[in-house]
Image: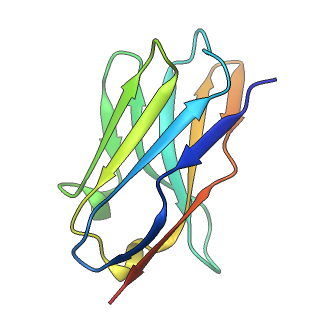
Amino acid sequence: QVHLVESGGGLVQAGGSLRLSCAASRVISLINTMAWYRQAPGKQRELVASITRGGITDYQDSVKGRFTISRDSAKSTVDLQMTSLKPEDTAVYYCRAYSLNRNYWGEGTQVNVSS
């Protein structure tokens, strides 16, 4: 059984920065994509950013230029550097690692951005 554990959440003022990290309980082989999702109260979970094994990244429009995703495939870790944070970034952030026949989720870390 693989567990993904997120860390780095917290409370920050608008304009501030946070770095989220996600680590797997063991190295996961054959994982193509690692990603960060978020879910705000009363809203659906949404994709924030993803990165493939080959390093191709994709970002939600609202975070482009502010967030940067990176991964270490050898260690099965993925980070999300968040800058210029806004109150609307407040949410629970979830890590996900998946490929064609594998799909793992973390339990989330809370990010609160005050105005």
Please identify the quadrant where the C terminus is shown: bottom left
Left or right of 106, for residue 90: left
Question: In the image, residue 79 lies at what x, y percent?
Answer: 40, 39
Residue at image location 69% in from the left, 33% down from the top? 104
**Percent position of residue 56, x then y:** 30, 26
| Colour pattern of the rendering | rainbow
From the viewer's perspective, is 78 left or right of 54? right
Q: Is residue 63 above or below residue 105?
A: below
Residue placed most toward the observer, 65 or 108: 108
Is 22 above or below relative to 29? below
Q: 104 or 74: nearer the eye?
A: 74
> Which residue is pictured at 24% across the width and 61% down the height?
83
At 30% from the left edge and 64% from the top edge, which residue is drawn? 62
- Which quadrant does the N terminus fall into? top right
Does residue 75 sit above or below 48 in this rendering? above
Q: Residue at x 56, y 17 (%)?
A: 31
